[in-house]
Image (cartoon, rainbow, N blue to C red):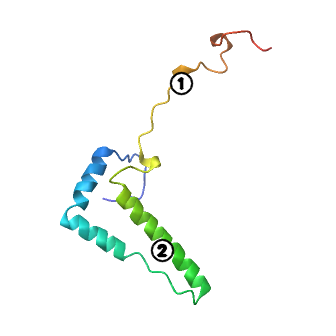
Amino acid sequence: MFSPTKKGILWDSADAQTLQNFLITPVGEKVLHILHSRIPGLLDGEHKNRTLVRSGEVKGAQSIFDLFVSLVAEAPADFRPQPKSQNESYPDLDNESAWDGESPR
């Protein structure tokens, strides 16, 4: 079941491969065509406010469609596993005994 939250969801290369395998099927191609057909068209500019609102809708829909298709290659940064920090390369800044040389005090 879909839940609109990103908590705990990570996207990896296995997920990308599964999506890619789906999108190359006839059903996957139909999904892409259906999603793309739902992107609203631009207005002619006759009504300035309506045209501005519609251009935002078009941009948003195109961004989501592009993101969906791009998931076969790489996950968005906020859904990638975060690398573990490597703090061992530098000692703690507050631990003066861990640093060589005299203390500046």
Q: Position of residue 46 (x, y in %)?
A: 57, 90
What numbered label is drawn on residue 87?
A: 1
- From this view, report whether residue 81 is shown above or below residue 75: above
What numbered label is drawn on residue 15?
A: none
The quarter of the picture where the C terminus appears is top right
Q: Amino acid at mark 1?
A: Asn
- From this view, report whether residue 56 is shown above or below residue 87: below
Q: Say left or right for 16 vs 44.
A: left
Q: Position of residue 13 (x, y in %)?
A: 31, 45
User: What is the secondary structure assignment of the residue under circle 2?
Assistant: helix
Q: Position of residue 84 (x, y in %)?
A: 46, 31
**Camera-nearest label, 2 or 1:** 2
**Label 1 neighbourhood size at 10 Å, few (<14), some (14-19), many (20+)?**
few
Depth check: give the residue in front, 51 or 91. 51
Identify the residue shown where x is 44% and y is 80%: 41
User: Mark 2 and mark 1: span between their CA atoms?
Assistant: 44 Å
Q: Amino acid at mark 2?
A: Val
User: What is the secondary structure assignment of the residue under circle 1?
Assistant: helix
Identify the residue shown where x is 52% and y is 20%: 88
Identify the residue shown where x is 25% and y is 52%: 18
Identify the residue shown where x is 34% and y is 71%: 35
**View extreme (left): residue:** 26
**View extreme (bottom): residue:** 46
Q: Earlier in the sequence, mark 2 or mark 1?
A: 2
The quarter of the picture where the N terminus appears is bottom left
Q: Position of residue 42 (x, y in %)?
A: 49, 81
The residue that mark 2 highlights is 58
